[in-house]
């Protein structure tokens, strides 16, 4: 099974900051990676898929990059609504999620 | 609008089975794969399986192989997930979700059901 490792597990930042979350795969997954945002009591929301394709309606301050085994989600100019938990997901042969990154207000 | 509506909360005893439904509306059911994902209380997301509503084809996580069965009824645009041999650590919210691109299981999940809480307790 391909293991996904996200870092950091918790990230403290302020409104207006630029933050980066990293996801590493235990073996190459090409660009078969998605990113989600989840808020308490809600279903996850798709932000980015195929590593860098922004889902319709998602603000352009979100961006994704990477290939192979290392991927990043970048959020430019953090907004109050962005404080949430973020997950990466690979969907190479099987699928699975990273353990999540909780983005909290500093 | 595009929507997935899941069945209601379930309480089951250890060893029992549960079957969760996921009714699709607002799009052509057969065109988009459905994935199932669960989330235990206070924990992260865990992928379980996907189903091709057109062919009925499935792929299961090795963790759940032998315990989970995905089916669908195209006449009512509904997908089903049945989990057997329930244990206390199967207590979780179970989600169905649609793949963002047509006719492939390999893309992000853009539409999610509201979740079904399954509680396993003696």
Image: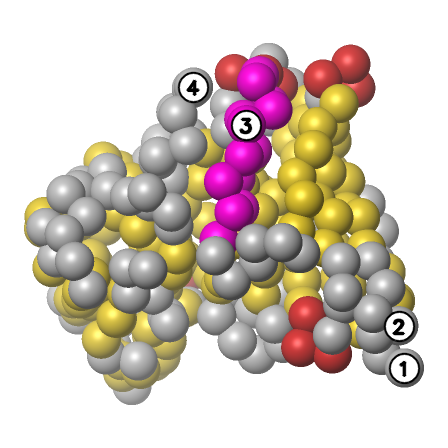
Residue at image mark 4: B103
Q: Nearer the viewer, mark 3 or mark 4?
A: 3
Above or below: residue B26 compared with residue B9: above
| Residue contact between numbered discs 4 and 2, judged by CB atoms under 8 Å | no
Residue at image mark 1: B122
* Quarter of the figure that contains the N terminus of chain A: bottom left
Tell me which chain the residue with mark 4 is part of.
Answer: B
Residue at image mark 2: B13
- For the record, the magenta segment spans B49-61
Q: Is residue B42 left or right of residue A95?
A: right
Tell me which chain the residue with mark 3 is part of.
Answer: B
At horizontal 37% and vertical 70% (from top left) the residue drawn is: A100
- Residue B59 inside the magenta-drawn segment: yes
Which of disc 4 and disc 3 is earlier in sequence? 3
Does dot 4 land on a helix, a strand or a loop?
loop
Q: Are marks 3 and 4 on the same chain?
A: yes
The answer to whether residue A77 is seen in the rendering is: no
At horizontal 28% and vertical 43% (from top left) the residue drawn is: A92
Which of disc 2 and disc 1 is earlier in sequence? 2
> Which corner quadrant of the image does residue B78 belong to?
top right
Observer-nearest of B113 and B76 = B76
Residue at image mark 3: B57
Q: Is residue A38 left or right of residue A21?
A: right
At horizontal 80% and vertical 48% (from top left) the residue drawn is: B19
Q: Nearer the viewer, mark 1 or mark 4?
A: 1
């Amino acid at each position: 099974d391909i293991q996904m490792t996200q870092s950091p597990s918790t990230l403290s930042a302020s409104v207006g900051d630029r933050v980066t979350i990293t996801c590493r795969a235990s073996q190459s997954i090409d660009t078969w990676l998605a990113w989600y945002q989840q808020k308490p009591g809600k279903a996850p929301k798709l932000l980015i898929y195929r590593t860098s394709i922004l889902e319709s309606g998602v603000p352009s301050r979100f961006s994704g990059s990477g290939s192979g085994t290392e991927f990043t989600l970048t959020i430019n100019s953090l907004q109050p609504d962005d404080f949430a938990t973020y997950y990466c997901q690979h969907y190479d042969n099987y699928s699975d999620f990273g353990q999540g990154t909780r983005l909290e207000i500093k | 609008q595009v929507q997935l509506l899941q069945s209601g909360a379930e309480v089951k005893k250890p060893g029992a089975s549960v079957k969760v439904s996921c009714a699709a509306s607002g799009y052509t059911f057969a065109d988009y794969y459905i994935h199932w994902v669960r989330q235990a209380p206070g924990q992260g997301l865990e992928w379980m399986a996907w189903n091709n509503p057109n062919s009925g084809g499935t792929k299961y996580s090795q963790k759940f192989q032998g315990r989970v069965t995905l089916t669908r009824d195209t006449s009512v645009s509904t997908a089903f997930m049945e989990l057997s041999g329930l244990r206390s650590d199967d207590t979780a919210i179970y989600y169905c979700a649609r793949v963002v691109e047509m006719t492939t299981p390999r893309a992000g999940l853009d539409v999610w059901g509201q979740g079904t809480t399954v509680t396993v307790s003696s």
